[in-house]
Amino acid sequence: MDLRTILGIRYPIIQGGMANISNGTFAAAVSNAGGLGIITSGGVDAQQFRQEIRTARSLTDKPFGANLMLMLPDIDRFAQILVEEKVPVVTTGAGNPSKYMDSWKQAGIRVFPVVPSASLARRMEACGADGVIAEGTESGGHVGELTTMALVPQVCRAVSIPVVAAGGIATGGQMLAAYALGACGVQVGTVLLASEECPIHEAYKQAILKAKDTDTAVTGRISGVPVRALKNRMTREYLRREKEGAGREELELFALGGLRRAVLEGDTATGSLMAGQSAGLVEEIKPVAQILEELYGGCREELELLRRHPALGGTQP
Ligand code: TUI
């Protein structure tokens, strides 16, 4: 199963739907560079969402998609807009999209739900998903519990539709590892935050470049909505209050607007700088086209190196 053929794209790489970040212009940039650009539904109202879809369509003749964040209040409206605007591909996150599946399939939309477990993957296959994105807890934003390494092969064993690996992936070697686990492509977010085209504040990009391997934390593991972001005053204070037994409502109020503060104002102290554990691998701001080419090219190079690895039966030159 070749994700490039299934989706009509040059590289088997899907952009993560990043709330408050991936607008139509950015998604079009990713699609024009050969990946599958994804427009977010997080942080926009229904009318803006429709406009972003139209913007993407005006900026690229390549396939693109949109992500439906299933915790949104006005979710039915967003789901219908995907049909009305005939978005070619839909990814979903933070819930179970089965009630929308029939209407999306009828509209000819390809559907790739994000799943944090093999059981949800199985349910998605049963209700007609074209593939699933198995997203490990290494990823940025809202996360599940299992690591990419453990989740992807178990999802692959559970379903026979295509599986895309996500969570913590930022290099060609990791992309190759995803193939070794049974995936047919990858979804990446954090590595694309550090692109020239990404519409986040410069200070947010610099914080990603500065981050090392242990610089992310997950807030909300106790209270209900686990979110991974770069460690800062916001995550420390959130975790302190959470440990002291603060309720979900109080914490949500505290975190409210944190992502917007990071994205728009570059507030690195009290903003929520959502990022995955791969932030420590991201060292430079580059054009999207170069990031995708290095991921895919790197993956193929690493495969050649492995072929020659003496421990795997090869003979090193
Ligand atoms: O959705 C994401 N990542 C996100 S959403 C987001 S916006 C946000 N901001 C603040 C608080 C919360 C969200 C930022 N990042 N990734 C996909 C994902 N889906 N991760 C985990 C899941 C998931 C979890 C449970 C998917 C399905 C699920 O199923 C529950 C069920 O109903 O079975």
Image (spheres, rainbow, N blue to C red):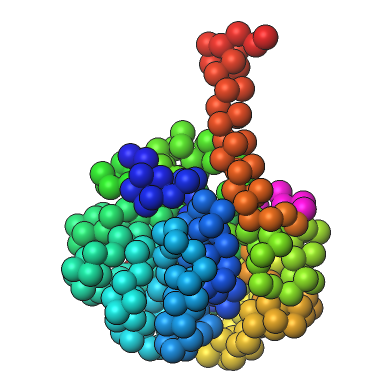
User: Can you tell which quarter of the image residue 71 is in?
Assistant: bottom left
Look at the image and tell me in which quarter the N terminus lies: top left
Please indicate, yes or no, whether residue 260 appears anywhere in the rendered image.
Answer: yes
Residue 199 locus on image (x, y percent): 66, 72
Q: Is residue 145 visible?
A: no
What is the magenta segment's predominant secondary structure? helix
Q: Residue at x 79, y 71 (%)?
A: 203
> Is 74 displayed left or right of 126 in the figure?
right
Does residue 121 sit above or below 205 in this rendering? above
As for residue 56 lying within the magenta part, the answer is: no
Q: Is residue 117 above or below residue 45?
A: above
Say which residue appears at 35% left-offset and 69% top-offset: 87
Identify the residue at image location x=23%, y=69%.
Answer: 107
Nearer to us in this view, 287 or 180: 287
Q: Which residues are magenta?
A: 277-284
Q: Pinpoint residue 39: horizontal percent, then vertical percent.
A: 48, 71
Placement of 181 over or under 76, stated as above or below = above
Q: Is residue 280 magenta?
A: yes
Where on the picture, by quarter, is residue 65?
bottom left
Q: How many marks?
A: 0
Q: Is residue 135 above or below residue 100?
A: above
- The quadrant of the rendering that contains the C terminus is top right
Pick the front one: 164 or 51: 51
Q: Closer to the camera, 293 or 221?
A: 293
In the rendered image, residue 18, in percent from the top left (x then y), is placed at 55, 69
| Residue 81: image location, x then y, percent | 34, 81
